[in-house]
Image (spheres, rainbow, N blue to C red):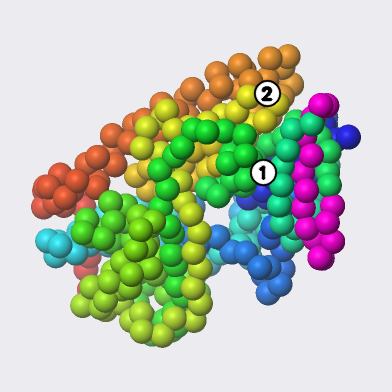
Amino acid sequence: MRDVIIIGGGPAGSTLARLIGKDFDVVLIDKKNKDEEKTTFKKPCGGLIAPDAQRALARFQLQIPTEVLANPQIFAVKTIDLQSKLITHYQRFYLNVNRHRFDSWMLSLVTDANVIEDARVTKVEKTAIGYDVTYIKDDNVYIEKGRILVGADGADSIVRKTFFKRRIRQYMAIQQLFSASNTKPLYASLFDHTLTDSYGWGLIKDDELIFGAALPLQDSRKNFELLKKRCEVYDFDTSQPLSTEACLVNSPKSIREIECGEDNVFLIGESAGFISPSSLEGISYALESALALAKALRRPNVTKVYKANCRKLKIKIWLKQLKSIVLYTPLFRRLVMMSKIDSITLED
């Protein structure tokens, strides 16, 4: 029997496995394949490492390899309010990366735990002495047994759905890829309150345009197509998609929607609800919540210590919720954009 079973090999799961692998018998089960051509899952994500995530990486003394970076590196965001037609530019310090390569790089840092890739978990259940995790790999069914179960499996977490009733607000993230070899470097945030109370994005990455949005679950694909149509006047050529990706994304409306876990079942990263409700940035929270649980696992009362370790993260999310009220309320957003506070003027 394993000490810890981790489901999900994103930044949260891989960080936890790396931090506790020397002290515990750990297995990590992930549905991705490190080979970008063979993987059956890619997270719909713009692939921008925000300053909070950069700070978290710096705490772990991690330097992103050049092969993970994407071109170009952009230092301004073009903010577009589609209803008022306001456009404002703001300076931002993001790192443009290939998200799949970033996740694969972080998973490659796990050297002291058993990593099972390209595997789909189908069932998790409590037993008399721990937890059983059933998964499929290469058309074969396997069962891992463990004393502690950790869900690091994102918004559609099988661990959260199985063991916890606490609900959390969710959106459907839809993202498409387009050829953009002749397009100027761009990162845009798109706001249209008639289609979503979250936002859309468009950015250039390695001569391709990534166009995506987080939308309410009902009529998400229809509203995504409407958003594409409305963005045509802003020179977004989204007529011929090369690929389409979609997945659920959590966005806590209240810190009461965050679920840390109990009874030797724990959630970290987005599965717990640790993700910014204003920007949907989750990497910094993934790393910080993994560290919080890693420290707690070395203490007698794991649940109590983990929840205490997460207090600062909850406060941070509460502050982001206040920011989201301004960002996603049309009147407040337009007043901020019209004020030009903290904006920059682009020169030709």
Amino acid type, residue under disc 2 in the picture: Asp
Q: Quadrant of the C terminus?
A: bottom left
Of badges 1 and 2, the one in the foreground is 2
Label 2 SS: loop
User: Foreground residue, 96 or 10?
Assistant: 10
**Whole-number angstrom distance, CA of label 1 to CA of label 2:** 19 Å
Report which residue position mark 1 lands on: 13
What are the residue bounds of the magenta stretch? Answer: 128-142
Q: Does residue 164 appear in this view?
A: yes
What type of secondary structure mainly makes up the magenta span?
strand
Mark 1 and mark 2 lie on one chain; the one further toward the N terminus is 1
- Whether 22 is among the magenta residues is no
- Of all residues, the one furthest to the right in this rendering is 1
Is 314 displayed left or right of 348 in the figure? right
Percent of width and height locating residue 198: 32, 52
Residue 79: x %, y % from top left: 25, 59
In magenta stretch: residue 135:
yes
